[in-house]
Image: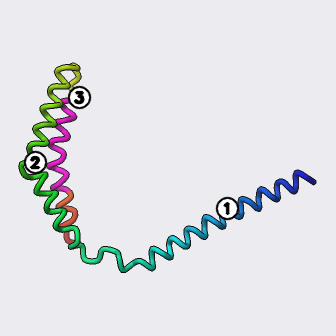
Amino acid sequence: MIVAKATEFAANEQFKQWVKVLLITAVLFALMMAAKGAYASDGTEFEEAAAKFEGWIKGNLGKLAALVAVAVGSIVAAVRKDWSWFFGALVLAIGIGVIVGIINASFTATI
């Protein structure tokens, strides 16, 4: 008798937790739908920041960062005799330039 009551109580508590989770999820979803006017609509609000970031990476700041990364990687590789630091810095320096091109191509592609 006591075991049956304990099992029923545990099942009831679990049911209450699921109802609570589903209710919170529904409320959050309703709030997100109510705030749809705050969503980005035409995509121009981030254009200035994206252009500035691209200028930094392709400009002197990006070249300096790549040079510093390769220099630090070379020094650590020479001290530790572990060439993965050098190649990691080289891949990072080259990868940043390539990633910017990929991101630009994916955002400016026409469908």
Q: Amino acid at mark 2?
A: Leu
Does label 1 or label 2 sit earlier along the sequence?
1
The label number, if any, that marks residue 94 in the structure image:
none
Viewer-nearest of discs 3 and 1: 1
Badge 2 local density, few (<14 within 10 Å), some, or many (20+)?
Answer: few
Mark 3 lies on residue: 84
Query: How would you rate the neighbour count of disc 3 (Cα within 10 Å): few for under 14, some for 14-19, many for 20 or more?
Result: few
In the image, is residue 24 above or below residue 84?
A: below
The count of marks equals: 3
**What amino acid does circle 1 point to?**
Gln
Query: Which picture quadrant has residue 38?
Result: bottom left
Along the line of sight, which residue is nearer the eye, 76 or 100? Answer: 76
Determine the secondary structure under disc 3.
Answer: helix
Q: Residue at x 14, y 57 (%)?
A: 54
Please determine whether, in this image, residue 46 is positioned above or below residue 80: below
Question: Where is mark 2, residue-wise?
Answer: 61
Lower sequence index among marks 3 and 1: 1
